Image: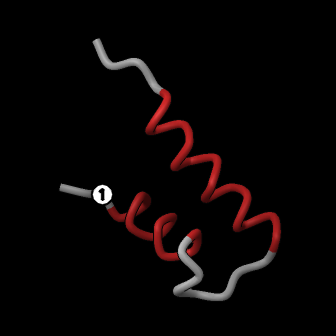
Amino acid sequence: MTDRTTAYAKLIASGGKIAGRSEYLACRRHLDDITTSCSY
């Protein structure tokens, strides 16, 4: 299950919604953090 924040970040990063550069970079950073985070 994907939370709302991650779903929005995926939408922006995929180009499904137009966003400014800083918003795009924040979404990419969020997605990168999820994939590289350690889960214990």
User: Left or right: 33 with respect to 40?
Assistant: right
Q: Is residue 36 above or below residue 7?
A: above
* Quadrant location, the C terminus: top left
Q: Identify the residue at horizontal 38%, vertical 67% (top origin).
A: 7
Q: Is residue 37 left or right of residue 39?
A: right
| Residue at the extreme right | 21
Name the image colouring. Answer: secondary structure
x%, y% of residue 36?
Answer: 49, 29
- Residue 29, image x and y in percent? 64, 47
Residue at (26, 57) in percent of width and height: 2
Q: Residues within 10 Å of mark 1 (few under 14, many from 20)?
A: few
Is 23 on the left or on the right of 12, as rendered?
right
Q: Secondary structure at mark 1?
A: loop
In the depicted structure, whether residue 27 falls above or below residue 14: above
Q: Picture coordinates of residue 27 (x, y %)?
A: 61, 59
Q: Label 1 belongs to which residue? A: 3
Name the residue type under label 1.
Asp
Look at the image and tell me in which quarter the N terminus lies: bottom left
| Residue in the image at 79% along x and 77% along y | 20
